[in-house]
Image (cartoon, rainbow, N blue to C red):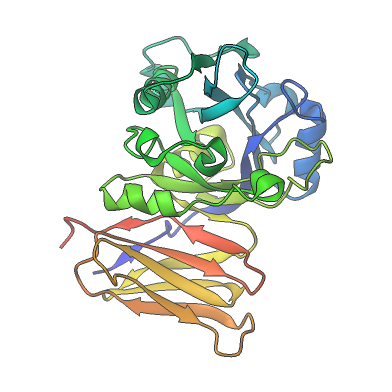
């Protein structure tokens, strides 16, 4: 079996999909936050303010820096109608989809600075049904979606793992990592994958730039696309043709002669995560304790439903591939 984890052609583009501005609870204006990410070598940015869709493509975008129209939609379970305490929350990104998705949208496409009211609940809710309805509505508006920071959101597993139609789950959120250590969650991603869901992952900043915690340039995706334009970048995300990272780089990965392999920047550990049986997968760990691994391999046993790779340096910074789905290929 031979499968490439990335397309053979294309250029690497770095971007942040989760970003806030003064249009919601961020400190920087949209033009200021766009300039900041451009200065730090990013190629694209989704300005995704709370419950407010924005489209700054013409105003802030250029041939070398792409703005993805987006919003972070909300459904909130409050303890009671005083709205003093939030018990759980669904945050789902809607990012403007491909031309075909826009053409086939059942509802009107969102317009610039359109308010998308949060769904509010008190005391109790059917969390799974609420999440699915929110996801479905965003899709009907021509968006791709990501399910954001479930640990921070305090949602129970059964309130989101069966959601259908999400492109990706946010497994690393730099802002909430530094705010309250609630930003890492690959566990529930694997639960979803083991259930047979074909869902990808993203790392992001969730930056507010308010100075309370460090929340910029710590989580991102690196997309391999033919061009730096909306259609190519979004299609690459839909196809899973990218990796997520909090630091390390992944240059190539895939399966060659039934052996999973990865080539990466210097790391301390490589995890080959596989489903679906106990003891599936394997690890390659540096014997020196240093970041001296740049290539690793793992021979597949033939019963894996999927395989994905994590590359982690000695400081704990990680890069994640998306899965290669194997069930049904043999």
Screen quadrant of the C terminus: bottom left
| Residue 174 point in image, percent of width and height | 66, 48
Furthest residue in direction bottom, as rendered? 288
- Which residue sits at x=19%, y=67%? 303
The answer to whether residue 235 is visible is yes
- Which residue sits at x=25%, y=48%? 196
Asked whether 200 or 126 is in front, the reply is 126
Horizontal side of 242 relative to 115 (left or right) equals left
Horizontal side of 221 relative to 277 (left or right) equals right
| Residue 49 point in image, percent of width and height | 65, 25
Horizontal side of 107 relative to 319 (left or right) equals left
Give the answer, above or below, for where 116 lies relative to 313: above
Screen quadrant of the N terminus: bottom left
| Residue 158 point in image, percent of width and height | 35, 37
Asked whether 155 or 225 is in front, the reply is 155
| Residue 273 point in image, percent of width and height | 38, 65
The answer to whether residue 98 is visible is no
Asked whether 51 or 104 is in front, the reply is 51
- Which residue sits at x=63%, y=45%? 15
Give the answer, above or below, for where 155 lies relative to 294: above
Give the answer, above or below, for where 316 lies relative to 6: below
Question: Picture quarter containing residue 309?
Answer: bottom left
Q: How many labels does the image show?
A: 0
């Amino acid at each position: 079996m031979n499968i490439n984890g990335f397309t053979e052609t294309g250029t690497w583009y770095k971007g942040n999909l989760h970003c806030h501005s003064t249009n919601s609870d961020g400190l920087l204006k949209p033009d200021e936050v766009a300039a900041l990410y451009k200065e730090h070598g990013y190629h694209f940015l989704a300005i995704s303010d709370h419950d407010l869709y924005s489209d700054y493509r013409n105003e802030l975008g250029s041939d070398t820096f792409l703005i993805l129209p987006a919003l972070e939609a909300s459904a909130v379970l409050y303890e009671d109608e005083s709205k003093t305490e939030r018990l759980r929350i669904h945050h789902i990104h809607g990012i403007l989809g491909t031309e075909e998705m826009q053409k086939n949208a059942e509802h009107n496409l969102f317009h610039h600075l359109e308010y998308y009211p949060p769904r509010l609940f008190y005391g109790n809710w059917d969390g799974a049904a609420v999440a699915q309805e929110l996801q479905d509505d965003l899709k009907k508006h021509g968006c791709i979606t990501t399910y954001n920071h479930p640990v921070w959101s305090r949602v129970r597993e059964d309130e989101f793992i069966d959601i259908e139609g999400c492109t990706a789950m946010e497994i690393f959120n730099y802002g909430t990592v530094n705010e309250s250590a609630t930003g890492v969650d690959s566990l529930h991603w694997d639960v979803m994958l083991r259930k047979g869901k074909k869902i990808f992952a993203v790392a992001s900043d969730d930056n507010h730039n308010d100075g309370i915690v460090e929340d910029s340039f710590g989580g991102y995706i690196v997309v391999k696309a033919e061009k730096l334009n909306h259609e190519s970048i979004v299609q690459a995300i839909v196809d899973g043709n990218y990796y997520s990272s909090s630091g390390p780089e992944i240059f190539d990965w895939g399966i060659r002669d039934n052996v999973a392999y990865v080539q990466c920047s210097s790391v301390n550990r490589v995890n080959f995560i596989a489903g679906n049986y106990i003891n599936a997968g394997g690890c390659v760990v540096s014997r020196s304790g240093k970041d001296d691994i740049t290539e690793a391999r793992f021979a597949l046993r033939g019963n894996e439903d999927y395989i994905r790779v994590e590359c982690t340096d000695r400081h704990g910074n990680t890069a994640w591939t998306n899965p290669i789905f194997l069930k049904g290929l043999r």
